[in-house]
Image (tube, rainbow, N blue to C red):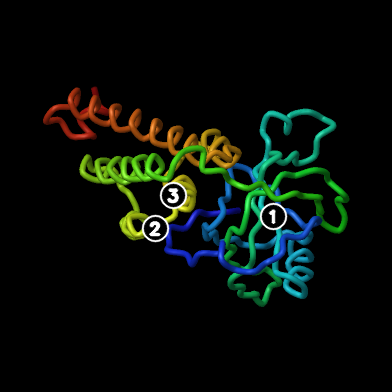
Amino acid sequence: MAVAVSAPVPNMKTMDIRLPDEVPVMTLPNCVFFPQALMPLHIYEPRYRRMLKDVLATDRIFVVAGLDLKLAGTPEQFEPPHHVATLGIIRACQENANGTANLLLQGLARVGIEQILREEPYRRIAVRPLLSAPGAKAADLRILQSDLMRLITLKQKLGVEVAEEMADFLRGVDDPDTCVDLAAFSMCEDAKLKQRLLETLDTFRRFQLFNAKLKVEIEEIKLQKKLQGHLSDDDIAQN
């Protein structure tokens, strides 16, 4: 099971890491991993324990892909992954006495899944790197980045619980691409939109999609507060 963590991360874009063409993969339901993000994982299945042993002995790299629920219901499909996923590197790993392990994975890059090469003893896939494109002038990206931070601050003022540590960290992120990816990873609860954001290589468009979602959420919160008036949440629920 994957659990999102809101924590500042070092910039991996400047690290000289050659992305392999063939990698192991974990296919997880309701999980969308992003470049630059940190994600804790608990490894307990025998196939993934074997995978972890192998990757720790080599480059410490594997892919996390979301489970494609549309294809998962068809009999001929076994754990079908979404075609866009994120390749990550193990930053820390604690092996437990019972053979399980807890690790911290950091996203390196978006990848396109070209082919499933084999399933045993764990799934390996062929991948190709997917590079983001700005999609607009730097000044236009800065405007949307500022708008994103304004919307996050507004949600906080409206009483929505937003991880303060991540919000503060995002305010200091200079790179727009990294900013929107980390915001989407840590603050987007809509799994379908999250996967769409991962698949959107145009940074400008990614900002537009995520900012639009935040604006809708804010208007819904305002409407709820207006309708609620002075009543508490418990009182509203009893009506």
Disc 2 element:
loop
The location of residue 80, given as percent across then percent down, is: 75, 39
Q: Callout 3, which amino acid?
A: Pro
187 sits to left or right of 195: left
Towards the viewer: 51 or 210: 210
Res. 159 image quadrant: top left
Q: Viewer-nearest of labels 1 and 2?
A: 2
Query: Do tag 2 and tag 3 residues touch (Cβ < 8 Å)?
Result: no
**Tag 1: amino acid:** Val
Q: Earlier in the sequence, mark 1 or mark 3?
A: 1
Q: Residues within 10 Å of mark 1 (few under 14, many from 20)?
A: many
Please tell me how crowded label 3 is: few (under 14), some (14-19), or many (20+) other residues with Cα within 10 Å: many
Cα separation, mark 1 vs mark 2, equals 25 Å
If you read the primary sequence from the N terminus, does the residue marked by circle 1 or circle 2 appear first?
1
Q: Position of residue 11 (x, y in %)?
A: 50, 64
In the image, what residue occupies the spot 70% across and 64% down? 61
Question: What amino acid is labelled 2 in the image?
Answer: Val
- Pointer 2 residue: 173
Query: In the rendered structure, are the residues bearing label 1 and label 3 in contact, judged by CB atoms less than 8 Å apart?
Result: no
Image coords of residue 28 (percent x, y): 66, 47
Q: Which residue is mark 3?
A: 176
Report whether 186 appears left or right of 200.
left
To which residue does mark 1 refer?
Answer: 63
Binning the other alpha carbons within 10 Å of mark 2 as few (below 14), some (14 to 19) or many (20 upward) gives some
Work out whether residue 184 or residue 101 is closer to the camera in this orientation and state it: 184
